[in-house]
Amino acid sequence: MIANIVERHFLSEEAADFIRKETGEEIIDIMDIEVDKEKLVKAEIIISQRRLTEELVRECKDLKWIQSFSAGVNLLPLQTLKELGVVVTNTSGIHAPQMTDLAMGMILAFSRSLVEHIRYQKTLRWTQGFSYGELLDSELLIIGSGKIGEMLALKAKAFGMRTVGIKRTVKPLDNFDEVRPVSELKDAMKTADYIVILLPLTPETRNLVDAEALSCMKESAVFVNLGRGPIVDENALIEILKNKKIRGAALDVYKREPLPDDSPLWELDNVIMTPHVGGWGPGNEMRGARLVVDNIRRFRKGEKLINVVDPDMGY
């Protein structure tokens, strides 16, 4: 029997049943990898969002394809999978609506001093002495101008912002005033009013935004990270925030998750924090399920899959 595994700790029964019904495939739900390991190692296809170790995938003798239910695939042993000839695909693009909503919400919160007002509201203080900006003609730097970055640029344009993208392969993109290579990252950070990280974590992006890059920001700039925590030198960011060298930061991802209780980030009044929920949204699951169904049909027909990951590039 060919076992096609839907790892259900992240996927609802409704979505799993949708995949089963639309494809007619033999689907086995697994809630716990360790408990149901015997079933997992027989799989031809694995649909998962969890870390799969090198040792585990080597035991999966019939495995041909892993569909990650996440855009990031840094939890998979990509080089081992390449060696074994296992194709990896991700769900890049399904998180764009909700992640870009969060990014714009964070930007607006700083632009209109909403965090300060919420804090003062709790103490019954009527205070108007905060900084009030406007997004019209302000510059947004999007570091990682893929599908999510493109949607963010579209939304930013509705506010009249100037949009600049950083992309590994430079090419014209809709709703971007300018697209620059990674080599020009520090120069681009010097003029940006808002900087949003949307990169995957790869060997090339790890610590890409280091202390030197962070020091390039204007004192009025706001830094937003919705990519992965290790892309940024977190200690350097904390020092810059402590010393008020920038306006503030909005973070959804961190070097260590959950964020440790002793992290200085908890105490900083110029930081907005969310617990890695940027990709969560009511439409996310079914967008992913529909993509999975499309890919299963392509797989059975021998057609090119959607969102194939380059194991050397990491995305």
Image (cartoon, grey):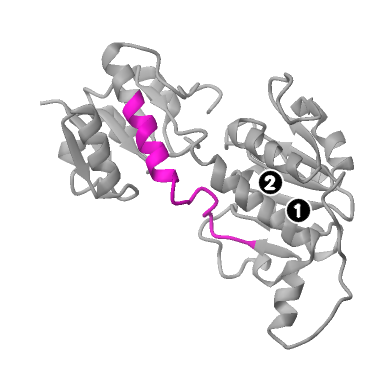
Give the labeled residue for mark 2.
232
The magenta region covers: 273-294
Percent x, y for residue 171? Answer: 72, 18
Amino acid carrying mark 2 in the image: Val
* Residue 205 showing in the rendered view: no
Give the labeled residue for mark 1.
236
Answer above or below: position of 273 versus 87: below
User: Which element is circle 1 on?
Assistant: helix
Percent x, y for residue 269? Answer: 74, 70
**Dots 1 and 2: beta carbons under 8 Å?**
yes
Residue displayed at 86% across by 76% down: 128
- In the image, 10 versus 238, the foreground residue is 10
Graded by Cα atoms within 10 Å as few (under 14), some (14 to 19) or many (20 or more), the crowding at tag 2 reads many
User: Which element is circle 2 on?
Assistant: loop
Q: The N terminus lies in which quarter of the figure? A: top left
**Which residue of the protein is positioned furthest toward the top in this rendering?**
302
The Cα–Cα distance between marks 1 and 2, rounded to whole angstroms, is 8 Å
Answer above or below: position of 196 versus 239: above
